[in-house]
Amino acid sequence: MSGLDIGAHKTRAVVTDLRGNTLAARRVELDPALAAADRIRVVVETAHACWAEAEVEPDEITEVVCGVTGALRAAEGVNDVRTGPFGSGLSPYPLPGFSEPDLSAVLSAELRKPVAVANDVKLASPG
């Protein structure tokens, strides 16, 4: 499994085995004003570097989940982070330019894996 975190000041990637043991973790500091396309490029590079450090082939990654700072907005409006949906059709903000890309689709294409995207607080919360 691989987890990603995209924040205003950093991105993180982690790889775990199926028992949840951490195999590798990477953190890269980011400029809060970094454009969305550049931020996504760094996220993808960080994920690939983390997978390599864990000595895991991309084909061995079974799941990718991405937590993003900020509220999540769907076509019908802003969702409460405790009940908001996962996946495509959501745009996280206040990251610069993140109201435009379909983050789930872009990351899935770049990583060649399905990527579930949700608010980082929601992903860390129990239940």
Image (tube, rainbow, N blue to C red):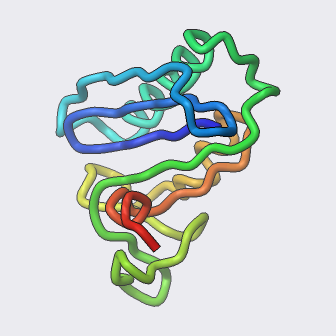
In the visual, does 41 lie left or right of 119?
right
The relative height of residue 54 versus residue 100 in the rendered view (above or below) is above
| Residue 13 position within the rendered picture, expressed as x and y whole percent measured from the top left | 46, 30
Picture quadrant of residue 40: top left
Q: Which residue lies furthest to the bottom in this view?
A: 76
Total marks in image: 0
| Residue 110 position within the rendered picture, expressed as x and y whole percent measured from the top left | 65, 34
Q: Which residue is drawn at 18% across and 38% down?
A: 32
| Residue 3 position within the rendered picture, expressed as x and y whole percent measured from the top left | 52, 40
Q: Residue furthest right?
A: 59
Picture quadrant of residue 25: top left
| Residue 101 position within the rendered picture, expressed as x and y whole percent measured from the top left | 49, 55
The relative height of residue 125 versus residue 76 in the rendered view (above or below) is above
The relative height of residue 118 versus residue 81 in the rendered view (above or below) is above
Q: Which residue is at the front of the view, 86 or 73? A: 86
Q: Which residue is at the front of the view, 55 or 10? A: 55
Q: Residue at x 24, y 28 (%)?
A: 30
The relative height of residue 86 versus residue 17 in the rendered view (above or below) is below
In the visual, does 121 lie left or right of 30?
right
Quadrant housing the N terminus:
top right
